[in-house]
Image (spheres, rainbow, N blue to C red):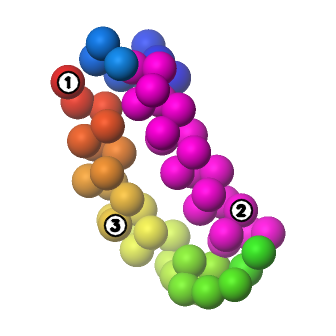
Amino acid sequence: MEEAVPAADADLRAGLIGAIMTGVVVDRYLLKLGAVADAPAEDILALLRPCFESLTRD
């Protein structure tokens, strides 16, 4: 994933993206504890998109 992130700290940024995605997947599909599990995928993507965009910009 580092190749897709044009920044000096691309490995850190890619790791953070992976960690966020892992957390969402664990909460949504394994723990199924709250709002993340019940939210439409489109809503989750809309809220996370700015975060991912900021991590993939230099």
- Mark 1 and mark 2: Cα distance apart in space: 29 Å
On the image, numbered disc 1 is attached to which residue?
58
Residue 11 in the image: above or below residue 34? above
First of labels 1, 2 by sequence position: 2
Q: Position of residue 39 (x, y in %)?
A: 52, 82
Q: Secondary structure at mark 2?
A: helix
Magenta: main secondary structure equals helix
- Taking the magenta stretch, the answer to whether it contains residue 11 is yes
Q: Quadrant of residue 12?
A: top left
- Residues drawn in magenta: 10-30
Residue type, mark 2 in image = Val
Q: Could you tell me if the residues under marks 1 and 2 are in contact, i.e. CB atoms within 8 Å?
A: no
Q: Nearer the viewer, mark 1 or mark 3?
A: 1
On the image, numbered disc 3 is attached to which residue?
47
Residue at the right extreme?
30
Residue type, mark 1 in image = Asp
- Taking the magenta stretch, the answer to whether it contains residue 47 is no
On the image, numbered disc 2 is attached to which residue?
26
- Mark 3 and mark 2: Cα distance apart in space: 17 Å
Q: Secondary structure at mark 1?
A: loop
Q: Position of residue 10 (x, y in %)?
A: 39, 20
Q: Quadrant of residue 48?
A: bottom left
- Mark 1 and mark 3: Cα distance apart in space: 21 Å
Residue 29 in the image: above or below residue 37? above
20 left or right of 56 in image: right
The residue at 41%/30% (across/down) is 13
